[in-house]
Amino acid sequence: MSCKGCPPYDEQDKSGIYFPRCFQWVRGGCTKKNPGNVASIHGLAQQVMPKFFDGLELDYVHRLAPHKYVTASWVLSHMKAAGFRFGGLYTFRLTNDVMRTPTIIGDIHPSTQAANLNILYYPFECLRMEASLQKGSDKTPVDSQLTVELTRPCDTWSANFYSVRKQTGRCTLSLMRAITTHVALGGEMLLEWNAPQKLSTDYALAARYSHHNYALSATASRNGVDISYWQRIYPQIQMANVLAYNYSTNKTIATIGYQWNFWDAAVHGMIDSDASVGVMWTKYLSNFPLEMGLSVVMSIPTDRFAFGMRFVVDPSGYRSGE
């Protein structure tokens, strides 16, 4: 059977009309930006909220080479593990002062032998593999978190494994996709087991509507609902509102936070519906490689507060971004 009137298979035909080959892969285009993963959907609002600390913290950061850093810290606190720790950062590959993975970050407590280890590796530009290990005392098992994430132009696929063992473990599988330039939708599935033959599942939905100066995000599951709103009011001022509702306790907490950046300082503040107020202030000295931080948080109903001071010595300018 022949058909002389059918378009040819040759793409170079002068008519410009042709049949595609069998099983031909045609790559499409995507004008939408990558939406990130489900875990960071509230990231813009969380960055504005202050990270409080109490007691006294002394940190030292020194750069031996563009891909080698040494860190040391001494902490006196009720919220963090007190004592002295030292560690560092090392990247195996370096291209023109640009660090390439794999990258190893770790620290250890000499007295208790408690240690943290983080390994980050990009075998391909679109594939991220990360492992975080945390060891407490000698009697406690090692807590681990393994992450495999595939990033494409319009969506992100993520898999997280938390302390996976034969008897216990937890795993999350998530997908976040950009529907339009401003709208992104996603979902997450949780798998958790406390025995080899007992497996429980849970599901969550995520959505975000964003522009260059504001973003509205929401997540919902059987455990509760979280809603966050972030806005850049001025180039130096950011504001965030967070609303969290828990089904089991039937409790709702609303928090308002702000961030005010100066050329050599930054101020973070918050107030929530439980009548807790807090302020965190960070100052970078220009004539000395020192970063100073003050943190104050107070609960008005209980009349209790926590105060903290932090000093970071950084001769190489790593913390200040120089």
Image (cartoon, helix red, strand yellow):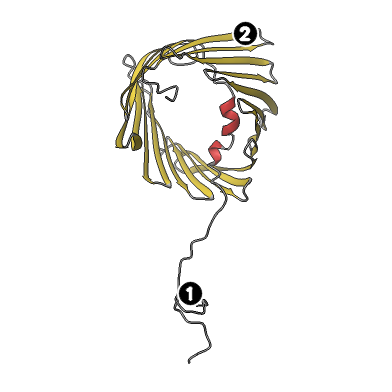
Q: Nearer the viewer, mark 1 or mark 2?
A: 1
| Up/down of 235 relative to 14, above or below | above
Residue 295 quadrant: top right
Q: Along the line of sight, which residue is nearer the eye, 215 or 112?
A: 215
Q: Which mark is residue 20?
A: 1
The residue singled out by tag 2 in the image is 304
How far from the left and from the top, in percent, is residue 92?
29, 35
Residue closer to the observer: 5 or 50: 5
Q: Give the x, y percent position of residue 113.
A: 32, 19
Q: Quadrant of residue 133?
A: top left
Foreground residue among 194 and 161: 161
- Give me the residue at 52% from left, 17% from top: 264
Q: Secondary structure at mark 2?
A: strand
Residue 138 seen in the current view: no
Q: Amino acid at mark 1?
A: Pro
Which amino acid type corresponds to the residue marked 2 in the rendered image? Arg
For image coordinates 50% across by 77% down, the residue present is 19
For residue 124, above or below residue 110: below
User: Marks 1/2: CA distance?
Assistant: 73 Å
Horizontal and vertical percent position of residue 110 = 31, 16
